[in-house]
Amino acid sequence: MSRPSLGGYGRVRRPNRVGGRAGGVEGDDPTVSEPGFGAYDLVVVANRLPVDRKEEPGGSTSWQPSPGGLVAALEPIMRRHEGAWVGWTGAPGEAPEPFDAQGMHLVPVPLSEEEVELYYEGMSNGTLWPLYHDVIVQPSFHRQWWDSYVRVNWRFAQAAARQAARGATVWVQDYQLQLVPRMLRDVRPDLRIGFFNHIPFPPYEIYSQLPWRRQVLDGLMGADLLGFQRPADANNFLRACRRCGLPTRRGEVVVPDEHSPHGRRAVRAAAFPISVDTAALDEIARRPEVAERAREIRRELGDPDVVLLGVDRLDYTKGILHRLKAVAELYDDERLPLPGTVFVQVATPSRERVESYQALRDEVEVTVGRINGVHGQLGKPAVHYLHQSFPRDELAALYLAADVLLVTALRDGMNLVAKEYVASRFDEGGALVLSEFTGASIELTQAYLINPHDIDGLKNQLVNAVRDAPRERSRRMRAMRRRVWQHDVGRWAQDFLQALERVRPGDDPGGEDGASAPEEASEPASPELVAVGGRDRRSTDHPGSDRGDVDVRDADVRGVGQPVPR
Ligand code: ADQ
């Protein structure tokens, strides 16, 4: 069976392939060739490195660990496996030489000013981000952005191929690098390749708008295991595959593969909901100085009866305007008494050069100003708005100070803020109002769940969260804490890597035991897409509903939605 023919990656020259053996890679420059293998058994490939560059007063630079769940999750594993991390420093221009920090080998990938604009701000954040988040904002489609995306993905793939030892595991992260799995497999078929999508994978009706929908699927298909936040995301992906003529069965896609002895291989798709470092957050929140700071925050706010809190990147997916609308109406209706209530909205600056983010910031700031204009008093704003980043312990103090955390995302892969809040509430106090459009809502079912588009419903649940008896609030918080203790970020990484370990590259997915034999597609493939599977499946396809063929055991294995005994 021939490999999928996708018509190439647009106008960009595809990387040359190294035939049937594992070997070296070629660079952007065809005269440069680096045969051989790297030294690392585990290579993480992510858009960003896990460190931030810090300019010291004397003009020198140092590297500080960048806070974040992914780094916390992977750091111990990276240390154990002698891992390398390939990523961008966050600043345009030349990249520093690879260096060692925090027990990891860090490999900076350079991005030019133009690539930051086209690949990062353009294709990643102007096309894929809005498309994958239910087109809350209209995605833009530009061929120049796509070309840059291909070029940059290839650069990341090359860098990873240079670091990976023979037979190593490479774990590619997120939507900015969806072509890397295929590019890597082409040059290094010896590798075990995993990919994790941190954001939702949209329904096919939305995904199909992408002019490069075939190429992106082909890019992902280079992986052995594709991880998604929710079973629904994995199902959306599998359905897109079927629509493109690739047979799927029980959470696997069968793809042609000339490197495999059987001429084909299985790509598994499953849900692995990401989480937080629960023990670390619990420990920070228990520090006496953090508890003292939480008390101080309430004093600074004027000792109100009720503190409402929102903590988000300033992003249109987070539903900040919906939240402000609900709170303002509750002030209007006097169902939230003033001045006894304050709302603190912390909004981290994000993607500030992207137009839709500038427009959102303006709208949020005008709205906050309007609410304070109507409801504020001298020295007592009704909404405190902080467009700033905070260190971990200050966030923990804010979480402890808040009676209610509001998470009103319109669409969110997971939402770690919700889990951080729960992990920090060792006192079993506080209440979580949580959008059902977050991945977190599948696990944190004891939250006050809301549909952020239903402003009346949101208002009612917010009032319930404020007014419910402390016993009821503690009962809910206790149940949610059990969940985040048992499913922390370490378990997420371990589950994913163990599932990737179980991939046996030589297996025949359509082999005699029939365990994972391909099934017929359940929907007609789009006529122009049938070439993806290497053969025309139209004659065997029959229209029908999406069978949602992520094996339900995927969900059970991860415990999604399952009550967890303590
Ligand atoms: P994000 O969209 O960035 O992540 P989220 O999961 O909530 O959303 O993570 C935000 C992180 O930033 C949290 O760790 C939070 O503590 C931190 N943060 C927010 N405001 C801050 C502030 N003012 N100062 C300091 N830190 C702040 C993407 C996806 C999510 C998915 C994650 C992980 O969009 O759906 O949960 O990746 O997979």
Image (cartoon, rainbow, N blue to C red):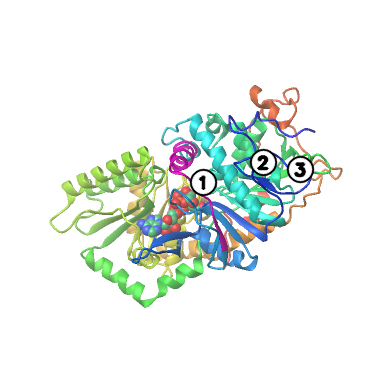
Q: Amino acid at mark 3?
A: Arg
Q: In front here: 362 or 46?
A: 46
> Mark 2 — residue?
221
What kind of residue is marked 1? Answer: Ile
Observer-nearest of 314 and 311: 314
Q: Residues within 10 Å of mark 1 (few under 14, many from 20)?
A: many
Q: Which residue is mark 3?
A: 265
Can residue 38 be found in the magenta stretch?
no
Residue 512 versus residue 52 in the image, above or below: above
Choose the circle earlier in sequence order: 2 or 3.
2
* Image quarter of the C terminus: bottom right
* Residue sitting at the far front: 31
Question: Tag 1's secondary structure?
Answer: loop
Q: Quadrant of residue 343?
A: bottom left
Q: Note whether residue 260 is visible.
A: yes
Q: Quadrant of ligand 1?
A: bottom left
Q: Is residue 108 magenta?
A: yes
Mark 2 element type: loop
Type of amino acid at the residue the image marks with label 2: Met
- Identified at 81% across, 48% down, the residue is 507
Indicate if the residue with disc 1 has its beta carbon within 8 Å of ligand 1: yes
Decide if residue 325 is on the left or right side of residue 159. Answer: left
Q: Which portion, as a residue range, is magenta?
A: 105-128
Q: Position of residue 477 (x, y in %)?
A: 45, 63
Give the residue at x 36% y 63%: 59
Task: Identify the residue under disc 1.
Answer: 199
Disc 1 to disc 3, C-alpha distance: 26 Å
Q: Earlier in the sequence, mark 1 or mark 2?
A: 1
Q: Residue at x 35, y 38 (%)?
A: 355
Coordinates of residue 291 in the picture (x, y in percent): 34, 73
